Amino acid sequence: MLGGISTVEGSQNTTESLGRFAVEEHNKKENTVLEFIKVVNAREQVVSGKLYYITLEAMDAEKEKVYEAKVWVKPWLNFKELQEFKLIGEVVASDCSGACDPIN
């Protein structure tokens, strides 16, 4: 659906790559040392390019936390930009199979 937000179809490598990019860019901007763990969920919106809404887990000072990132991609311009990166909560259990629920 044009302009609507939908689940990302296709390669898990793409969403993992975007998740890693989001963590790296956040670390550069905020001078932090988050370590990417995995993508929990990914959605996309067709704009001038694609806007990806990525829910991911990252390690922050020995604690697994859940973040939401927005990454804007224009492949024809070789353009990729982190638009937003915010903490949602901590991972409920240390061993989550599938999607983990954050603590708010």
Image: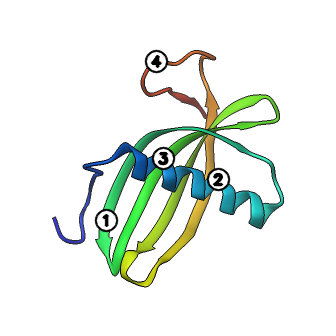
Nearer to us: label 2 or label 3: 3
Nearer to us: label 1 or label 2: 2
Residue 16's tag is 3
Q: Position of residue 95 (x, y in %)?
A: 58, 15
Give neighbour class at mark 3: few <14, some 14-19, many 20+ (Cα, 10 Å): some
Q: Secondary structure at mark 1?
A: strand
* Amino acid of disc 3: Glu
Residue under label 2: 23
Residue under label 4: 97
User: How far separated are the C-alphas under marks 1 and 4?
Assistant: 27 Å
Residue under label 1: 45
* Amino acid of disc 2: Val
Tell me, yes or no, whether the two marked residues, 3 and 4, touch with CB atoms within 8 Å: no
Whichever of labels 1 and 2 marks the residue nearer the N terminus, that label is 2
Nearer to us: label 3 or label 1: 3
User: How far separated are the C-alphas under marks 2 and 4?
Assistant: 22 Å
* Amino acid of disc 4: Ser
Tell me, yes or no, whether the two marked residues, 1 and 4, touch with CB atoms within 8 Å: no
